[in-house]
Amino acid sequence: MRIARVVEAIPPSGIRRFFDIVSQMDDVISLGVGEPDFVTPWRIREAAIYSIERGYTQYTSNWGLLELRREIAHLLDRRYGLEYRAEGEVLVTVGVSEGLDLALRALLNPGDEVLIPEPCYVSYRPTTLLAGGVPVPIRTDASHGFRVRPADLEAAVTPRTRAILLNFPCNPTGATLRRSELEAISRLAERHDLVVVSDEIYAELTYEGRHCSFAALPGMQNRTILLNGFSKAFAMTGWRMAYAAGPADLIAAMTKIHQYTMLSAPIASQYAALEACRSGEQEMELMVADYARRRRLFVDGLNALGLECRLPEGAFYAFPCIRATGLSSEEFAERLLREERVAVVPGTAFGEGGEGHVRCSYAAGMETLREALRRMERFIQGCGSRGAGRRGAVEAPVAVVSAGR
Ligand code: PLP
């Protein structure tokens, strides 16, 4: 066998298959991708253009430009009250994706376990496996707002547990953790000597209250690898810019891997990120205010259709329950796409606990969201949902169209 067993065993992303179908169809409203619909603010783009004009086309320090790390340290202080040293405690990474990979590879010995609340971002399991670890899913559910219960984490700890991988606000559920819950998790991390890898990429997209970083809790900075970046808050997905902040020994270990695999993050992107730190907050806040309006419109619309949906506290995803339609989440997503040309992602793409839900990104214009809701209404009426829809009709679900599967 030419392919390594660990790679062979990893299934392809459940999202990919839907994108492949979408790419062959016209007039599709895609609520499938986790990506801002905004273009990166002009000043940020301009900063990258100027850097190229000036001939800044070289590698940078492995850690990233020192000025950028300083600005990131200021940003973390300004927005979350965190104090990191730019030299030694901050590493510029190629997306949070790279930061996550580095963190897990730096932490895990073969067979070490990582507690991962699910449903979760699609790459957590594969990245853990590729780092030689064992993902231990901790189910979260709608009845508790998809917030992980600290007691469930505690019950899953074994002598092999090495880390907890948190993501709040959460992709795909939009749930975020309360301070009291974070504190309970911090106590158990302390008790069992665990490292917390905290993916806070949606921190700025928090609509209820203020985001509390895990590293800001008493005693936690020394056992937290904080991952954050520019993709979502500054509409910069294509620039691949992010950072890891943490205790010097862990960041040095991550930098060791980064220097051999990545060398450094792209320099033009680093200049763009520098500008984002310096002047991007105002535009970021405008974008967040826009997401907040879309969230209301879309979530109210889903509930009016009979697709029960909590108001997500953060990120830009709605995670409605589709059980009233009598369809599984895969069937719902596939039929909605084929019959009404609206792309959403089945909840099962994010773990088994996602069954009965679909993820819809509301990072789309208001009119697009209204049209998506109209199409979804037609779809629900068409499939004669049990108890769903304004009509409250009780009809048998239609047989599943399972083309291509
Ligand atoms: N973490 C979460 C929770 C995400 O939702 C995403 C992207 O959707 C990422 C990480 C990857 O982010 P980046 O673009 O910084 O690699």
Image (cartoon, rainbow, N blue to C red):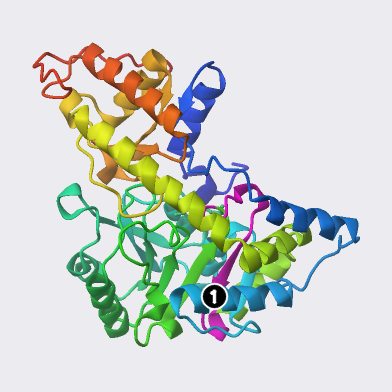
Residue 147 screen position, x and y as percent: 24, 58
The quarter of the picture where residue 254 lies is bottom right
Q: Is residue 273 left or right of residue 14?
A: right
The quadrant of the image that shows the N terminus is top right
Circle 1 crowding by C-alpha within 10 Å: few under 14, some 14–19, many from 20: many
Instruction: Determine if residue 97 is in view.
Output: no
The quadrant of the image that shows the C terminus is top left
Local SS, label 1: strand
Q: In percent of the image, x 47 and y 36: which residue is there?
A: 364
Q: Name the one closer to the observer, 325 or 152.
A: 325
Give the magenta part as a residue range: 232-250
Q: Name the one closer to the observer, 199 or 389.
A: 389
Q: Is residue 25 left or right of residue 124?
A: right
Q: In percent of the image, x 56 and y 73: which residue is there?
A: 75
> Is 332 contained in the magenta span?
no
Q: How many marks?
A: 1
Q: Name the one closer to the observer, 248 or 268.
A: 268
Would you place residue 365 above or below residue 273 in this image? above
Instruction: Determine if residue 140 is in view.
Output: yes
Q: In percent of the image, x 31 and y 42: which residue is there?
A: 296
Residue 8 screen position, x and y as percent: 52, 43
Q: Is residue 188 left or right of residue 278?
A: left
The quarter of the picture where residue 263 lies is bottom right
> Is 245 contained in the magenta span?
yes
Outermost residue toward the bottom in this view: 219
Would you place residue 331 above or below residue 116 in this image? above
Residue marked by disc 1: 245
Give amino acid for label 1: Ala
Residue 269 screen position, x and y as percent: 72, 58
